[in-house]
Amino acid sequence: MNFSIETFEKYTLVKVEAEKVGGIISPDLKAKFVELNAQNVRNIVFNMHNARYCDSSGLSAILVGNRLCKNSNGTFVICHLNDMVSKLIQISQLESILNITPTQQEAVDFVMMEEVGRELEDE
């Protein structure tokens, strides 16, 4: 499997197991994001620790996940980017659109803070 899924109370962790996020796994990744969204998952932490490379189809999958979470009033956070993937996101001018953290724990903390903010807004 090219990615693994772990479900927690407030978020779902999607962890890339492949070295390349591209044409081979991108369609499956997009389908998984759509499936999670249909299951009312609104917060996703996308861990790219194992990914050494990402192409435009990989970026497209990431943007699908981000859009689905935003449309569900949730949060999509990417963590553990290597330098090459980080530069691709910067070149694509997506760093202002995507939530990016250095570590998985910081990504989880980011999601939790967003959830607290939404709960306070609802009161």
Image: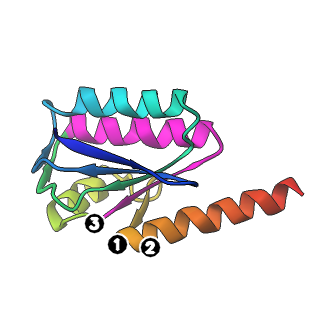
Whole-Å distance between the Cαs marked 3 and 2? 10 Å
Locate the N terminus and report the quarter of the image it occupies. top left
First of labels 1, 3 by sequence position: 3
Q: Of the residues shown, which amino acid type is indicated by label 2?
A: Glu
Q: Is residue 74 magenta?
A: yes
52 over 40 or under it: above or below:
below
Element under label 1?
loop
Contact between marks 1 and 3 (CB within 8 A): the answer is yes
Q: Is residue 5 magenta?
A: no
Q: Which residue is mark 2?
A: 106
First of labels 3, 2 by sequence position: 3
25 over 43 or under it: above or below:
above
From the viewer's perspective, tell me whether residue 85 is left or right of residue 75. left
Element under label 3?
loop
* Residue in the image at 32% along x and 36% along y: 61
Q: Which residues are magenta?
A: 56-80
Task: Tell me the quarter of the picture where residue 121 sits.
Answer: bottom right
Q: Of the residues shown, which amino acid type is indicated by label 1?
A: Thr
Q: Within 10 Å of the Cα at label 3, are there few (<14), some (14-19), or many (20+) other Cα atoms?
A: some
Contact between marks 1 and 2 (CB within 8 A): the answer is yes
Q: Which percent across, then down, holds residue 24?
A: 13, 30
63 over 13 or under it: above or below:
above
Q: Which percent across, then down, holds residue 34?
A: 44, 28
From the viewer's perspective, tell me whether residue 23 is left or right of residue 65. left
- Tell which of 95 and 49 is nearer to you: 49
Q: Which residue is mark 3?
A: 80
Q: Which mark is residue 103?
A: 1
